[in-house]
Amino acid sequence: MDLERLFIVLQAHKGKTLGILIGLAVSLFVIYFGIIKTFFVIFCCLIGALVGKIIDDGESVQIWIKKNIKDFQ
């Protein structure tokens, strides 16, 4: 199978390909670093993605935190 055909197949199955790569990465992190450190890295990545989304949306992080913490009270 040539490289161009491989890219066409991968393009058609983006979700499955991404899921496999994420599963592979998480399993390697668990093997090398342990479950607690792996969950910590995943948690930090999720927090970073959330802050990045807030910034991309043009909001201030402080205003977003105040607005959402007020919803919990």
Image (spheres, rainbow, N blue to C red):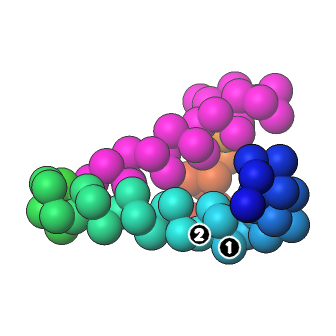
Front residue of 19/36: it is 19
- Is disc 1 placed on a helix, strand or loop? helix
Q: Main secondary structure of the magenta part?
A: helix
- For label 2, the SS is helix
Residue at 64% in and 34% down: 52
Judge by depth and name the residue closer to the eye, 3 or 45: 3
Left or right: 52 with respect to 25? right
Q: Amino acid at mark 1?
A: Lys
**Is 24 situated left or right of 39 in this image?**
right
Return the residue at label 1.
16
Q: Are marks 2 and 1 in contact (CB under 8 Å)?
A: yes
Give the label on residue 19, or none. 2
Taking the image as drawn, is residue 11 in sight?
A: no
In the rendered image, residue 33, in percent from the top left (x then y), is placed at 14, 54
Q: Which residues are magenta?
A: 39-62
Question: Where is residue 61 drawn, in percent x and y?
Answer: 62, 30
Q: Is residue 47 above or below residue 11?
A: above
Based on the picture, tell me whether residue 57 belongs to the magenta stretch: yes
Q: Is residue 50 above or below residue 30?
A: above
Up-down: is 47 above or below 10?
above
The image quadrant where one finds the C terminus is bottom right
Under mark 2, the amino acid is Gly
Residue 60, image x and y in percent?
69, 26
Crowding at dot 1, Cα within 10 Å, few <14 / some 14-19 / many 20+, comes out as few
User: How many labels sit on residues?
Assistant: 2
Residue 2 coordinates in the image, percent (x, y): 76, 52
Which numbered tag is attached to residue 59?
A: none
Tell whether position 49 is magenta: yes
Viewer-side residue, 15 vs 70 = 15
Specify the quadrant that holds the N terminus. Answer: bottom right
Mark 2 vs mark 1, CA separation in Å? 5 Å
Residue 21 visible? The answer is yes
